[in-house]
Image: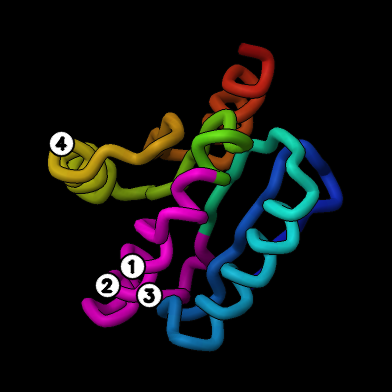
Amino acid sequence: MRFIDTWLPLIVTVREGRLDRSELEQLVAGFESHFERGETYAVLSVALRDAGPPDAISRMRIAEWMNQPEVRRCSQNFCAGSATVTARAWERHAMTALSWLWVPVAPHRAVASVAEGIAYCADRLVE
């Protein structure tokens, strides 16, 4: 996992594997460091082509972390929005359906390309 914050207020996360425990720890450390700064940001999440989808355990771990009260509070206060690049239409539709069951505290959109994700994040930051 690469947590890139050199383009603040845009944070880019690049998933290199299946979001195993090590990658999740890297992601958590990056966000916790940024939460301490208390600055507004937007997130663009991408995965390398050969990263493979996260397994059920990884999805559960990320959901547990995202649902922690402090993480939800910081995300609500500082995250202007996030975009996740998913090249396959069915994956974007599945992410939309999931948002009917679990509403993120900050606006989120599944997008088809990095350019679309950057545009969405920029729009959210301007608002």
Q: CA distance from mark 4 to mark 3?
A: 24 Å
Quarter of image, res 95: top left
Question: Could you say whether the residue bearing mark 4 is in a helix, strand or loop?
Answer: helix
Q: Specify the farthest residue to the right.
A: 6
Kindly check if marks 2 and 4 are in contact, taking CB atoms under 8 A apart as contact: no
Q: Which region shows up in magenta?
A: 47-73
* Residue 116 appears left or right of 103: right
Residue assigned mark 1: 64
Q: Earlier in the sequence, mark 1 or mark 4?
A: 1
* Residue 37 appears left or right of 65: right
Q: CA distance from mark 3 to mark 1?
A: 21 Å
Residue 89 appears in the picture as rendered: no
Residue assigned mark 2: 60
Give the residue type at disc 4.
Answer: Trp
Residue assigned mark 4: 100
Q: CA distance from mark 2 to mark 4?
A: 17 Å
Residue 127 appears in the picture as rendered: yes
Where does the image place residue 57, in percent across and percent down from the top left? Answer: 26, 82
- Closer to viewer: mark 1 or mark 4: 1
- Classify 67 as above or below 48: above
